[in-house]
Amino acid sequence: MNLLFRIKTLCAGFIITASVVFASVLGTIAPAAATELTLDAALKKALADDLWLKANAQQQQAIVALSEVDSTLPDPVMSVGLVNLAADSLAFNQEPMSQLKIGISQKFARGDSLALKRSQRLQQSKTYPLMRQVRQAQITKALSQHWLTLYHNAQAIRLIEQQRPTLEQLISSAERSYGAGLGSVKQSDITAAQLDLLLLDDRVLSYQTNFNALKQQLNSWLPAQALMQPLALEVMHNQPQINASSINWLNQLSQHPEVLVVAQQVDVLKQGVDLAKESEKPQWGVSASYGYRNSAPNGSSRADLFSVGLSVDLPIFSRDKQRQQVNAAQARVASKGTERLLLIQQLSARAHSTLAKKQQLMKRQQIFSQTIVGKNRLQHQAALTNYGNDLGQLSSILRSQLALINAHLTLLAISVELQQLDIELNYLLTSVKP
C-alpha cells in the first residue's frame, strides 16, 4: 500500500472522538488559505528536492555503467621487437633467425565469469530503487510525525489562550470585590491567582518555544523559502482505520521495502557464489606472431615466420584457495539471509509494540473523553456556583479551571500520540510500489 497516500489523510489533527470533545474548546478551524503550506505540499516538495534520492539514482547509473565494463574482455596485448640479432655486429641480416617480430595475444575470462559479473552488477542496481522507496517512506513518516508535533504545540497554545480571558476576568472581578470589601476574597487569593496566570503564560511560552524550534527543524526536509509560508495545521477527520487483527504481519513485513533491499542483496551474493565457482575453471589465451626476416648477405631471400599459440593456466596449487573463496561466498549469502530474518523480527516487534501502546492509549482516551473531562467540567461549574453564592473560594475556581485545561491538554496529547502511532503502523505496512 502507498504510505504517502495513507499519510495524506492521516496527519495534522485529532482523531474523530477527540475532535468532538475539543469542539467546544477549540472551535471550528478554518480551512487552509491558498498561500499556506499544507502537509501534502510539504511532502511533495520534500520528496522532490531530497538530495539523498538524487544521489542514490546517480549511484544506480554508475552501477549500470560498470556492468558494461565488467562484461568486456581485457584488451589484447600487442608486442613489437627485434629478436635474435647477432651479438657481435647487431646486423639484422647476418643470422637466419634474426627477425622483426610483431605479435598479439588475447586472454579470455574464466568460464562465464564475464556474464556473471555483468548480471551481478545489474542485480545490484535493482537494489537502488528499493532503497529509494525506503527513503521516501522514511521521509513521509518523519515529516508527518514532525507536522503532528507542530500541530500539538500550536493547538496547546490556542487552547490555553482561549481560556486565559476567562481567568483574567475572574481575577479582575475578584480584585474589584476585594477593593470594595465584598465577599470573602483575600489578598493571598488574588496573589495566588495572578501567580497561576503567570505559570499558565509560562506554559504558553514553552509551547511557543517548542513550536518555533520545530518549525526551524523543517529545514531538514524543506528549503528555507518554503518556510516563509504559514503552515496549514488543519484538522482532518477522514483518516484510514487499521484493522490489525486482519493483517498477516509476517507476510506483510516480508514485502516491506527495507526487507526487500536485504532480499535483493541476498540475490546479489548468490551470484557471487556462482562467480567464485567460475574461478575454479581454467583461463585460456591465444597468441599469434609474424616475424620478418631480411635477405642473407649473399642476397638470397629468407622466408618470414608465422607463429600461433594457445595458453591455459592450471589451477592446481590454488585449488584450495578457490574452494575457500566459494565457502566464503556461501557464508556471506547465509549471513545476509539471517540478517533478513532478523530485520523481519525487529519490524514485527515494532509493529506489535506499537499496537499494544495504541490499545492502551485508546483506553486512556476513552477515560479522559467520557469521564475525566466531564467531571472536571462539572467540578468547575460547581466551584463557580459556590463562589457566586459566597460559599466557595477563588482558589477552588482556579484549581478547577486549571484542572479542566490540563485535562484537555492531556486529551490533546493522547490524540496526537495516537496519530503518531498510526503513522508508524502505516510505515510498517508500506509495500513496494510497481
Image (spheres, grey):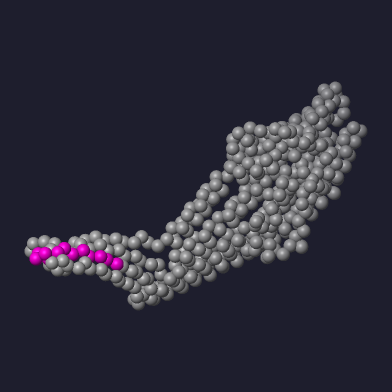
- Location of the C terminus by quadrant is bottom right
Residue 363: image quadrant is bottom right
Residue 83: image quadrant is bottom left
Q: Can residue 206 be seen by looking at this rendering? A: no
Q: In the drawing, does residue 1 fall left or right of residue 47? A: right
Q: Residue 85 in the image: state x and y as whole percent.
A: 14, 64
Name the foreground residue: 371 vs 118. 118
Q: In the drawing, does residue 10 fall left or right of residue 53? A: right
Residue appearing at x 13%, y 62% in the figure:
92
Q: In the drawing, does residue 419 fall left or right of residue 392? A: left
Q: How many marks?
A: 0
The span shown in magenta is: 288-299
Q: Residue 286 in the image: state x and y as whole percent.
A: 33, 69
Above or below, comparing residue 52 to residue 282 in the picture? above
User: In the orientation shown, which residue stands out farthest toward the left?
Assistant: 88
Q: Residue 134 in the image: state x and y as whole percent.
A: 61, 54
Q: Can residue 275 be seen by looking at this rendering? A: yes
Q: Residue 29 in the image: state x and y as whole percent.
A: 79, 37
Residue appearing at x 73%, y 48% in the figure:
10
